[in-house]
Amino acid sequence: MKAAVIRKYGTQVEIADIPRPALLADSVLIEVHAASVNPIDGIVQAGYLKEMMPITFPFTMGFDVSGVVVEIGDQVSKFKKGDEVFSRPNGMQAGTIAEYAVIKEEELAIKPPNISHQEAASIPLVGLTAWQGMVTKGNLQKGQKILIHAGSGGVGTLAIQMAKHLGAEVATTTSAGNAEMVKNLGADVVIDYKTQKFEEELNDYDLVFDMMGGEIMENSFKILKKGGCVISIKGQDTKGLAEQYGVRFEGFYMWPSGEMLSQLAQLIRDGLLKPVIDRTFSIDQIQEAYAYLQTGRAKGKIVIHVK
Ligand SMILES: NC(=O)c1ccc[n+]([C@@H]2O[C@H](COP(=O)([O-])OP(=O)(O)OC[C@H]3O[C@@H](n4cnc5c(N)ncnc54)[C@H](OP(=O)(O)O)[C@@H]3O)[C@@H](O)[C@H]2O)c1
């Protein structure tokens, strides 16, 4: 089958002809229709996660998928051949930028019927990250004030919509050119990070959802009310700032979950959450897709069209 692979750490992604992955008893074989790329792909490719996430080569890239079930493993009970599904599979097991992928049943959800495979492939990794950050970790409540950094990115565009759905007041940072887009997604306050300092504009916030780390994460503590919380998917509070400010800090890595993805699928079915796609590339244009991702300027997601 055709797949986007790396042959060793630090090398360019290439299109190769490799065997289909073997079906496992707890998994399904999916004919992939679409996948998407994420900043983590570049981190894996560079070898930064060598210890945490050992991989074998050639390694098929991709951590998001939407497609159709074509075979099921012996232990699989919730899915059947022909189901349209989407997933953020565990990275060690399945690469998704390929014609077929083997995905564990527990990491799968039925694709919302009202969106295309390309739209569905844009959701799992960033959608689960946003939900886990703001709801599971951040316990975001109706009426609370949240700052979502990088509201125009893959995670941010979904996070804004979810926070509004939960009844929060949402501020977000982005550059001026994206202000209209994030307002349309529901942001109440937009801070242009190139000309404004969010820490001088905002105060009394309950939650900050941080994707940037570094100084941006550190300054985020300044806008919280006592008992507030910084949730970061990029940095760690190595300076003990949470204690200093009398707030909470949590840094985390997102985790795959078919059950949680089903909840997001319901929001999509109900029209409460909409995919935001910047560009779509074919699998043969994978290097261009990664080059665009690396500019860091994506507005929403970069999707890979496979079938
Ligand atoms: N821990 C985890 O489990 C986890 C999960 C998912 C993602 N992440 C991390 O979270 C980060 C965001 O992921 P993503 O998929 O959303 O990335 P992305 O889609 O590539 O983000 C691009 C967006 O970031 C905005 N941006 C860049 N610099 C900014 C700044 N200084 N202030 C505000 N906005 C800025 C850009 O807007 P402009 O063009 O206007 O600059 C662009 O729209 C990445 O570092 C990723 O590795 C971690």
Image (spheres, rainbow, N blue to C red):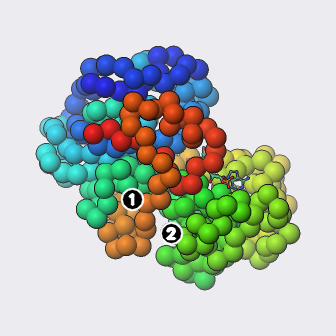
For residue 113, which quarter of the picture?
bottom left
Q: Tell me if I can see residue 141 in this picture.
A: no
The residue carrying mark 2 is 162
Work out whether residue 132 or residue 185 is closer to the camera in this orientation and state it: 185
Q: Which amino acid type corresponds to the residue marked 1 in the rendered image? A: Met
Residue 5, position as x, y percentages in the image: 42, 24
For the C terminus, the image quarter is top left
The residue under the point 48% across, 24% down is 13
Dot 1: few (<14), some (14–19), or many (≥20) neighbours within 10 Å? some
The residue carrying mark 1 is 260
- Return the mark for residue 5: none
In the picture, measured across the screen, residue 42 lies left or right of residue 101, that is right
Residue 95, position as x, y percentages in the image: 38, 33
Q: Which amino acid type corresponds to the residue marked 2 in the rendered image? A: Met
Nearest to N terminus: mark 2 or mark 1: 2
- Label 2 vs label 1: CA separation? 13 Å
Q: In the rendered view, would you say 135 is above or below 128?
A: below
**SS class, disc 1:** helix
The residue under the point 77% across, 77% down is 204
